[in-house]
Image (cartoon, rainbow, N blue to C red):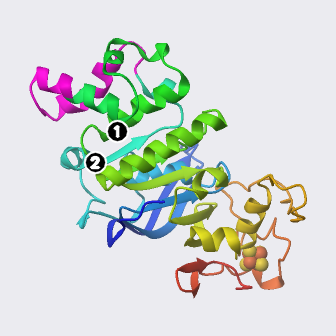
Amino acid sequence: MPKDIIQSPILKTANLKKHFVEGKGIITGGRTIYAVDGISFELARGETVGVVGESGCGKSTLAKTILKLTEPTAGRIIFKGEDITNLSSREMRPIRKDMQIIFQDPRSSLNPRMRVGDIIGEPLQVHKIGQKGEREEMVASLLKKVGLKPEQMMHYPHEFSGGERQRVAIARAIALNPAMIIGDEPVSALDVSIQAQILNLLMDLQEEYGLSYLIISHDLRVVKHICNRIIVLYLGRIVEMADTKTLYDSPSHPYTEALLSAIPSTDPFSGSKKIILKGDLPSPANPPKGCHFHTRCPYKIDICEEVYPELKEIEGNRKVACHLR
Ligand code: SF4
């Protein structure tokens, strides 16, 4: 677990929204998808925050909106004290150096026709850092930092294993010495044994460079060991936010409780009861009235069908959106 957290946010979002209009016709107005629907949180310098939830809950859209790979519909994004919400892509260019992303599948994020040395060196070239020879040395050093050999810079992505390809993607992400990295399911495509190696590498790099991480994952086991705090999303909204130990030891929101209970226990005598969620995640185009979770919640009461529960602080460092809390 990273130790050196500086309590000034590197990133802050305020009521951030990303709505898409799907199937807009001339006569019919199309339908609105509320992918991200009012997210406010802070990421401190040196901190790792996990964002969890089922597929379709808005995690990846949140990542893309923060990075302004897609324009926000409403709300604010403050990065390193600067409001970047309305910056143009040209104005974003120098800021992009400081915010990088690692995707789930390095096979599709690494250009198969480029040598790994060029893939890692490309951002250095784009931002005009160093001369050609110097850049080669920087690439060699980056390869060593992520546990690969400098001579592998001549190889192509297909010559690497899945875990090694993700190491290449990480080397490219840290090439410009960023302040923040967003990992969008960074280990989901890897074998469990390799996942731990990549997570350990991310933690080592965090210590060395003082990085801040936002780790998006559908798998609560992945985020448990590397995150200081966890945000649980349901249909584009935060339903619970707490420090990792508090959240895992005593989940407060029924959805968090269900997600945690779905993790297979390694202890056959643990006796923990499984909460099976009824039905699928409702469509973000048509979220249920009231608490969006009421259609699946085992503890639903009358008010839940009518009134959305505000996200409120229930104890130090824990916020929950549930009428029962
Ligand atoms: Fe369940 Fe009601 Fe709480 Fe929503 S507000 S999680 S439906 S108890």
Of residue 34 and residue 154, the one placed in the foreground of this image is 154
Q: Where is residue 22 in the image (x, y as percent from the top left)?
A: 57, 46
Q: What residue type is labelled 1?
A: Ala
Q: Position of residue 167 (x, y in %)?
A: 43, 32
Side (left or right) of 109 relative to 79: right
Side (left or right) of 305 relative to 230: right
The residue identified by callout 2 is 178
Q: Position of residue 265 (x, y in %)?
A: 81, 55
Is residue 273 something one can see in this rendering?
yes
Label 1 with label 2: CB-CB less than 8 Å:
yes
The residue identified by callout 1 is 173
Q: Is the magenta stretch mostly helix, strand or loop?
A: helix
Q: How many marks?
A: 2
Is residue 71 something one can see in this rendering?
no
Which one is earlier in the sequence, the residue at label 1 or at label 2? 1
**Image quarter where ligand 1 lies:** bottom right
Q: How crowded is mark 2: few (under 14 residues within 10 Å), some or many (20 or more)?
A: some
Range of residues picked out in magenta? 111-137
Q: What residue type is labelled 2?
A: Pro
211 part of magenta stretch: no
